[in-house]
Amino acid sequence: MANPENLLYSKDHEWAKIEGDTATVGITDYAQNSLGDIVYVELPRVGQTIAPHASIGVVESVKAVSELFSPVGGEVVEINPLLEKDPAAVNRDAFGEGWMYRVKVSGDPAPDLLSAADYEKLVTTA
Amino acid sequence: MSAPDAADVVRGRFEPGATEPLIFELGHPGRANTYFPNARALEEFLPAQTLRPDLPLPDNSELDVIRHYTRLSQRNFSIDTGFYPLGSCTMKYNPRVNDAMANLPGFRDLHPFAPDELAQGALALMYDLERYLAAIFGMAQFSLNPAAGAHAELAALLIAKAYFAKKGEGAARTTVIVPDTAHGTNPASAAMVGYKVVSLQSDARGRVGVDAIKAVLGPDTAVCMMTNPNTLGLFEDHILEIARAVHAAGGLMYYDGANANALMGNARPGDMGFDLMHLNTHKTFSIPHGGGGAGHGPVGVAAHLVDFLPTPVVRKTGDRYALDFDRPESIGPMRSFWSNFAHAVRGFTYILANGGDGLTKVSQLAVLNANYVRVKVREFLDTPYDEICRHEFVASAQELKRETGVRALDLAKALLDHGFHAPTMYFPLLVPECLMIEPTETESKETLDAFVAALRSIVEQAKRDPQAVLAAPTTTVVGRVDETRAAREPDLRWKAPA
Amino acid sequence: MYAPHTQSDIRDMLETVGVASLEELLRVPDAIALGEPLAVPRGLPELELQRTISAYAAQNDAAGYTSFLGAGSYRHYIPPVVPAIAMRGEFLTAYTPYQAEVSQGYLQAIYEWQSYVCLLTGLDLSNASVYDGATALAEAAIMAVNATGRRALLVSPAVHPNYRAVLRTYARGLELEVDELQFCAEEGTSGLDSLPALLAEKRYAAVVVQSPNFFGCVDVPGDSTRTAIEASGTVLIGVVAEAMSLGALVSPADWGAHIAVGEAQSFGNPVAYGGPYVGFIAANKEHMRRIPGRLVGRTVDGTGKLAYTLTLQAREQHIRREKATSNICTNQAHCALCATIYLAAVGATGLRRCATLNVERAHILAERVTRVPGFSRRFGAPVFNEIAIRVPDGTSAAAVLAGLQERRILGGVDLGRWYPQLADSILMTATELTTDGEIEALTGALGAIASGAIGGHAAPISGEASVVRA
């Protein structure tokens, strides 16, 4: 699946969609594909303040675990309630219904995030 | 899942290949066995608010209980029914005399709070076992307190932590070095004592390089955790230089005893420079695995760490034995009581049965069996570290996967159809599509030949008809299990139908 | 030696491998080669082996004594059906059921064990077992720390002293703080009335309470205490060191425990000088991802057939490594299997009757012992199968126990071993195995000791009767 042009990407295979001072965050299609069937997503708590690149959750597949590193910093204002019941949404639609949480961004939202094209290069050379 | 009708449950149960119902789906309230005499009413003794209102367990006749669990037993692989080539697990024969000895009334019915003077036999056995372990592995002293290998590993790291705290280096020494050939428990144990893990890559020979280890050593090094032979089945021939470097940096050397079956009478961790070690008595000394435990995990130390061993240890004064709890530097107890004593009896019985000469032979023949299988397997699968191995070796199905799409997992599942257990797979992580094979010394040449023939025929089939291998197993009571569903919709217990 | 190799096998195999001798096969650098035979005697044929090991067993004189010992390890009746099935080689010599297709029987048995633990504790889920009661408590404490992000624990002093000691061992590793409550000396309970004030700071990850507690007393929080626990977001860990009590007493879930841990040795496992036993951990479902160790789940195979498998393995050490919930690798599968077969055999009817007999025997014991002049119940709270007995003024628990031992009776444990202020009290245990005749022998001996008859006895009270601390 192509990496949408309107998103920014981290080297940890997360995406962020910046709209005003809010960022919606998820993992990339590349990440979900390498993890395999996702069975559980542990998300940060609403109200939690997170620093950019801090480990704030985990994604579990049947036999692998991957940490979530937030691409942006700020306060968590919403989590995707679907994922508790249906973590497979991340496999089905990593950039859409599989979004993970929203952050009210503090400071520069994306000093070191990549464009879709740069992220594409990262994963094809990996 | 909806509640099946009880009559249907029992009818369906006897059909060939049928699923065995749960014990909760069998039986009827009041269909009780008479084990106990009548008692007076609870309410005569205890206030009503302390009593539970209901006890929702099934009542089954003893025959139904026997039939149920006997049928379950038949849906299992075991050493008694087949060969396990499981690397790093040492699935050797479990002599029945060990169980008979553990079950002697003088051991079985001995209460842990029996006064020492009335438990002299048990204490003498623990003492003698400990002395033999110290002699076989070259350590100053063992404690039999930990309940399993990982538990002993935790004890060892707690000992290291207490040792550095006493030296005033507790705050500085915070890292544990773990090679990529280490068992998964190593980093998990390190985390439980608050240590950070530094991973170390093996060199091209599949060993820990002396320079590589020097590069990560520092004033923050607490412990270097290794096993020798390592999980590739290779002897770490530079172990003395590694130990010298770790000691020069002020760190401790820890020996993971999972692979001890390769060493007895040949070389001793104590002589290789290890300060701490654990044993999996259930591997090396033939204690039955019992489907995943109970284990038995003595922790051993060099002389400078003896004071930190977990309590209690058995002390001998003259010809009398006592449990010694009065050890102020000890890390404390690791478990409710003194040891997994019944397993200590089993391990001790095994040591006396073999003797020093026999144990030496055990390791020699374990290594012979592994090499015999290795040279036969390399005729049709890659063996990435192609040299004399110890008690186990690794093969890789990567080339086969590229050619046919058949992975290590598929080979393992197909072995089940040939009546063999799967080898250890995907471990160690540094070998792609890894199969790790440890035959143990108790398997005969004929059994090993049969195993190799089965594996060879599967590899040949993979090249001819990969789909057939991918479909395996087909002869087992269930096929490949939907693990994704198990994890996404956890069903971890029976619930009474609403 | 259990290896099947003939000399010609060895020769043939060496030739296949391409080495000349076993010694060459095992060559190691000279500096570490063991240059001498192992310092272990020559191996014994099985007949001599049995004689040698039996001689050790025969030195355990305790076998011939009448016993009122308990305190975390309990003698109970084990129906022969339990070992008869559990010792089948297909169970005994099976490996951990990682290969689900060839392990369905064991997996199902463990699923049944998990279900039994849930039914008995009243909680949502249980794991496949842990080492024993004490380590179950330590693991539960880590769960609570991870759930709350707090790093202090508040523990009742009436929790088994060995369990508290193990908790401290683990706590030192993780640098957790462990505080203890003041216990109520009249009732023998945990002094939970002070809890609301202590919890107000929201500093504690967990409160740990045992019921029946170490003194045998029912010891559960009242409504206002439970409200305070809930309000402070503290995890209530309920400890059950005598699982037999679950056949009669209110379940931990019903007295408010969020996590229940304990020891199930009483179900079909012998006392065996302390192990192996079988610890359990049960919890509310909110703790599902934090529960340590193996979990068996029910699912289907590729054809839709019901199947069992180890599940949620991403929590475990072999995948999550240093981020695992615990380093636990083994469970106590075979001991849990014994417990499961025991529970299946006795059923609800048998378990309730056996638990009731324990209550009855303990109360008869208490009543008869306190009829001996000078002996009284130390505490007032209701008890299950253990009772703290105060010895007459002017003597001590240790002296009375030594006197009993002279008469081939193990009268219980000396509470002064852990509680200096209770050096005048003995913890006595009765189970369904305790007969009227044994109680009579005990009371007769206590009467003789109390009336000073011991002074004229041939053997003086030994001052050396093993004084040990845990």
Image (cartoon, rainbow, N blue to C red):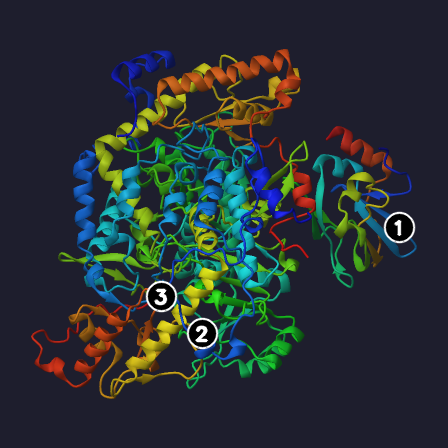
Q: Is residue B436 above or below residue C467?
A: above
Q: CA distance from mark 1 to mark 2?
A: 70 Å
Q: Secondary structure at mark 2?
A: loop
Residue at the location (50% across, 55% down)?
Answer: B59
Badge 1 amino acid: Ile
Label 3: state its secondary structure.
Answer: loop
Query: Where is B158 relative to B21, above or below?
Result: below
Of badges 3 and 1, nearer the viewer stands 3
| Residue C432, label in figure | 3
Q: Position of residue B237 (x, y in %)?
A: 39, 29
Residue C185's image quarter?
A: bottom left
Mark 2, residues whose alpha carbon is within 10 Å: few (<14), some, or many (≥20)?
few
Residue annotated with mark 2: B41
Do the residues marked 3 and 2 share a common chain? no
Question: Which quarter of the image is occupied by the C terminus of chain C?
Answer: bottom left
Residue A112 in sight in this render: no
Foreground pick, B356 / B419:
B419
